[in-house]
Amino acid sequence: MRMKTNQSKNNIQNPLPQGGNIIKRYLTRDAKSPAHAEYLKRERIQQLWVRFTQVALLIFLLALWEILTHYRILDPLLFSQPSKIWSMFISMLLKGELHNHIIATVLETIVGFILGTVSGTLIAIIIWWFPFLSRVLDPYLVVLNGMPKVALGPMFIVAFGGGYGGIIAMAIAISIIITTIVVYGSFREVDKNLIKLAKTFGANKRQIFQKIILPASFPTIVSTLKVNVGLAWVGVIVGEFLVSKQGLGYLIIYGFQVFNLTLVFVSLFIVAICASVMYQGVAILENRILRNRG
Amino acid sequence: MSKEIIKFNNVCKTYVTMEGETEALRNINLSIREGEFIAILGPSGCGKTTILSLLAGLISPTSGSITIWNKEVKSTSQNVGYMLQHDYLLNWRTIKQNIMLGLEILKQNTKENRDYALELLNEMNLLPFQNYYAHQLSGGMRQRVALVRTLAIKPYILLLDEPFSALDYTTRLRLEDLVSETLRKRNKTAILVTHDIAEAISMADRIIIMATSPGRIKREIEVPPPLRDPLPFSSRKVPEFQKYFQLIWREMNENENESIQK
């Protein structure tokens, strides 16, 4: 039986040594017993080492980059320089030259990501509802999924214009088919016995979907969110490469065209940060939604 | 003797697939009296579960008819509760939400019915766990929740499809008693499908032994009162228990040889 027990009582029965310095006490916080304290200490020291090494590796690589370009072993014209990238980033930020680009790209990504996920899920629901349709559409989905969506870029620009429309269409196109396939797959993989259970109570199709299929597939839908965040970024950046007059993708292409690689690196740096923040946001959301599931 | 409420009249069931057809049941004739506890015993593939699915109205017979209170079974009905082999508790719902599933689907989620479900939960000593999630409970507790979920819609007839087979032995014995007691108290008619001879003898009033390919009734054995009256665990200690065990064992092994010869 895995039931919650009241752990706090154990603390009183197993008094921990109160002495020791502040570091040791920090490392053994929340310990339930001396053995547990020892275990926690080992685990936490390990964890600290991982963090330390991660930071050290970053510093080492940046320093290497700086030194190699400083002494012209690498051409700073091609590879720029961390110090130059940083000072350009700060000066652009202070002059207010960045926020328009950042806002445009982030908005396009969020809209593309949400629309791609929602419409992919809706299509999945429709083809689940009509099994005949799912059999008809199967080869179409396979071809569309195999198709590199980026290749359709010119079509989207013609159809939706060169502004936000074309870019968001790109972001949707890149995630919608895979969302449909994955979510529909998860609908089908729901344990047939859960459906039988609902049927024994006389459930109709809508009730089966609402009470069983949809909640059972929720983890899959949420995990496609994570994938789609990444895909939406690809769609938006490629879309901006092709058409736009602003956005981070535009900055990258512009920097490349005027051969200002420092600008390219500044943009990449911002893309990396924004994409990570969005990914983390979705990961936190996932944790919240799925917290109570076994 | 109380009146018969369930009748199988010459029921045949053949499953048709792309590969061909499988005869699952041939000429099943069976009457079940109100309040009776029937055990259907047989090797796997003898159509035991098909009988329950037919009764529940989940599938319809190829020929013949099934009636409950002289009305032909055409679709699922609230009169029949079905308990599956595993608990199939929904892991995104709390225990309380799980037991309300049937009431929600039947659109009978009233205060009165909810209170009745909670009362049943209390009877199973599970009320303190109502806000837990299924994965926090043991297998025996989960199956008890599944029983509450089945009983919450107040069915007259209970179909039990090997409901104890996934449990460990001790839990199983305890649950057999609990289920028997609960059903007796409410005078429910029950049909238990099992391949466990001892379980059949200790729980049932009458045992239907089935043979395989095609599934058919081989023999019916009336369990005598000394074995029938006590709760399942005590029945196992009654001297006749062994006699009946041997009798059924022989009957079932004949089945085995028969199908090998084919």
Image (cartoon, coloured by chain):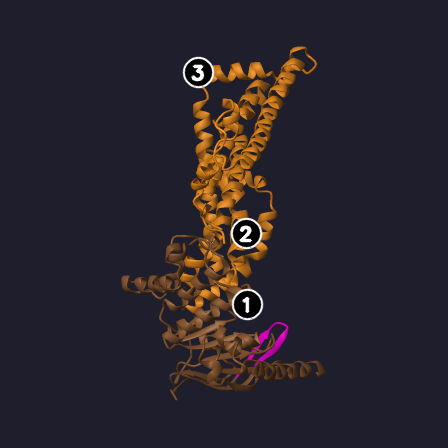
Examine the structure image and report whether residue B200 is included in the region drawn in magenta. Answer: no
What amino acid type should be assigned to the residue bearing mark 1?
A: Ser
User: Which residue, given by chain and number where applicable, does mark 3 sit on?
Assistant: A94
User: Which residue, given by chain and number where applicable, does mark 1 sit on?
Assistant: B165
Q: Nearer the viewer, residue B164 or A248?
A: B164
Q: Are marks 1 and 2 in contact (CB under 8 Å)?
A: no
What amino acid type should be assigned to the residue bearing mark 2?
A: Ile
Secondary structure beneath dot 2 equals helix
Q: Position of residue B82 (x, y in %)?
A: 45, 70
User: Pointer 2: residues within 10 angstroms few (<14), some, or many (20+)?
Assistant: some
Q: Are marks 2 and 3 in contact (CB under 8 Å)?
A: no
Task: Name the chain under label 1.
Answer: B
Q: Residue at x 44, y 77 (%)?
A: B190
> Magenta stretch?
B12-25
Real-space Cα distance between discs 1 and 3?
70 Å
Q: Quadrant of residue A94?
A: top left
Establish if A69 lies above or below B249: above
> Nearer the observer, disc 1 or disc 3?
1
User: What is the number of the mark on residue A181?
Assistant: 2
Q: Residue at x 39, y 68 (%)?
A: B151
User: Pointer 3: residues within 10 angstroms few (<14), some, or many (20+)?
Assistant: few
